[in-house]
Image: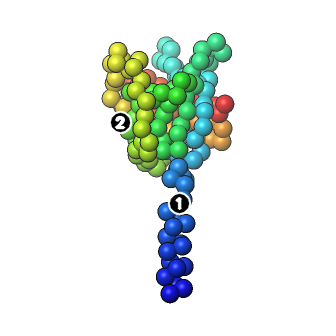
Amino acid sequence: MKPIKYILMILLIGGCADRNVSPELIKPLIGQWKLVAYEQTIDGRTQWVDVSNGQSNTLQFRYDGVVLNENGLPICCGPSALRIDGQLFRIEPKEPLPTNTGCALVFCASCEEGDVRVQGDEFTYQCPASPSGRSRYIRV
C-alpha cells in the first residue's frame, strides 16, 4: 500500500508543476527589449542607423515566445516561429492573448519565421522574407 501512496504523491507533485516553464531555447529572450538601431542601405552600402531616444520602441518576449508591444498587447504581424541562433522555435501561446485593435488597420507582409541572433544582452532580428535589413535590440 505504501508504494501506491508514494506514486500518487509523486504524481500530485508533478501535476502542480509550474506551467510557465520556458523551453531552454527561448529563455535568453524572455524579458523587455528596446530597439537601438536598424540596418539601412544607403548608396549601395549597408550601415547601422541609431534610433533616437525619444522613440518608444520596446517589445517583450513572453515565456512561450509570444512577442508583446510596450502596452502588453501582441505585436501586429508577428512571426509564428523564431529561428534562434539557427534553431527553430515555434511560437504557441500558452494563455489567452488580449486583442490588439491597432492591428486591424495594418497590412501585414508575410514573415512566418524571424531570424534572431542573441549575444548576451543584445540581439539582432531579421525577417528573411522581407527586403528590409536587421534590427538591433538591447535588454531593458
Mark in the foreground, 2 or 1: 1
Taking the image as drawn, is residue 65 in sight?
yes
Q: Residue furthest front?
A: 1
| Earlier sequence position, callout 2 versus callout 1 | 1
Question: Which residue is farthest bottom?
Answer: 1
Q: Pointer 1: what residue? A: 16
Q: Residue 97's image quarter?
A: top left
Establish if 75 lies above or below 91: above
Give the label on residue 82, or none.
none
Which residue is found at the position 50% from the left and 53% from the top?
19
Q: Position of residue 73 (x, y in %)?
A: 48, 27
Q: Nearer the viewer, residue 97 or 132?
A: 97
- Whether residue 82 is visible to the viewer of this picture, yes or no, is no
Q: Amino acid at mark 2?
A: Glu
- Find disc 2 in the rendering and name its residue: 112
Left or right: residue 11 compared with residue 52:
left
* Left or right: 22 as drawn, with respect to 95: right
Q: Quadrant of residue 106?
A: top left
Q: Residue at x 52, y 85 (%)?
A: 3
Q: Inspect the image, locate mark 1, and give the three-letter code of the amino acid beneath it.
A: Cys
Tag 1, which secondary structure?
A: loop
Horizontal and vertical percent position of residue 108: 34, 23
Foreground pick, 82 / 41 = 82
Tell me if mark 2 has few (under 14), some (14-19) or many (20+) residues whose alpha carbon lies within 10 angstroms of its own.
some
Q: Position of residue 86 (x, y in %)?
A: 47, 47
Callout 2 secondary element: loop
